[in-house]
Amino acid sequence: MKLSLGAIFCVVLMVSLQGTEGDNVFSRGYNYARDFAGGTRDMWRAYSDMRSANTKGADTYFHARGNYDAARRGTGGRHAAALISEGRELWQGSISSRGAEDTARDQEANRWGRNGNDPNRYRPAGLDDKY
C-alpha cells in the first residue's frame, strides 16, 4: 500500500512539474546538472586565467568574469558560481590572513558578475586583451 501511494505521488509530482513546452522534471534536472557542470568549468577557467595573467589588481575582474560566465548558463551555473564563490571566500577568510576589505571587494565582484553585469567594470589597466 505504501509503495503504491509513493508511486502515485511520484507520478503526480512529475506531471505537475512538466513545463509548458513538454519538458519534464527529468529533462529539467539534466539541464540543471549540465549548467552546474558548465558553471563549474567557467569558474575554474577564470581561476586558471587569473593565475596565468599574474596581473596586479586583476583578482576582482576574474571573480566577476567567472561568476558572469557561469550565471549566463542558467540556474545551475548560477548556483555553481554562488557555491564556489561563497565557499572560497569562507575558506580564505578562515585560513588566510587576507583583510576583510579584500574579501568584501571579492564578494562585491562575485555578486556583480552573478547578477549579469559586465565584468569589465573590474578590468585593471594592463591586463592582456586575451582575457
Image (cartoon, grey):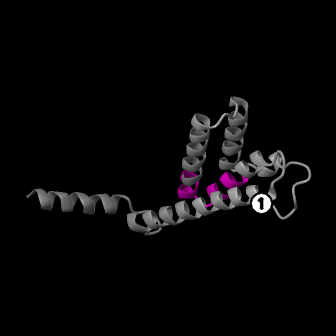
Q: Quadrant of the N terminus?
A: bottom left
Q: Is residue 7 above or below residue 93?
A: below
| Residue 15 location, quadrant | bottom left
Q: Is residue 50 above or below residue 103?
A: below
Residue under the point 66% across and 52% down: 67
Counting from the top left corner in percent of width and height, residue 91 is at 57, 41
Q: Quadrant of the C terminus?
A: bottom right
Q: Nearer the viewer, residue 57 or 33?
A: 57
The residue most toward the left is 1
Q: Nearer the viewer, residue 59 or 122?
A: 59
| Residue 40 location, quadrant | bottom right
> Disc 1 marks which residue?
52
Magenta span covers which residues?
Answer: 65-79
**Does the magenta segment cover residue 69?**
yes
Counting from the top left corner in percent of width and height, residue 83 is at 54, 48
Residue under the point 74% across and 56% down: 51
Residue under the point 38% across and 59% down: 17
Q: Is residue 49 above or below residue 27?
A: above
Counting from the top left corner in percent of width and height, residue 39 is at 59, 60
The residue most toward the right is 126
**Does the magenta segment cover residue 31?**
no
- Disc 1 crowd rating (10 Å Cα; few below 14, some 14-19, many 20+) is few
Q: Is disc 1 placed on a helix, strand or loop?
A: helix
Left or right: where 2 falls relative to 37: left
**Most frequent secondary structure within the magenta stretch:** helix
Left or right: where 101 falls relative to 86: right
Left or right: where 124 falls relative to 41: right
Left or right: where 95 falls relative to 62: left
Q: At label 1, which amino acid type do we have?
A: Ser
Residue under the point 61% across and 35% down: 93
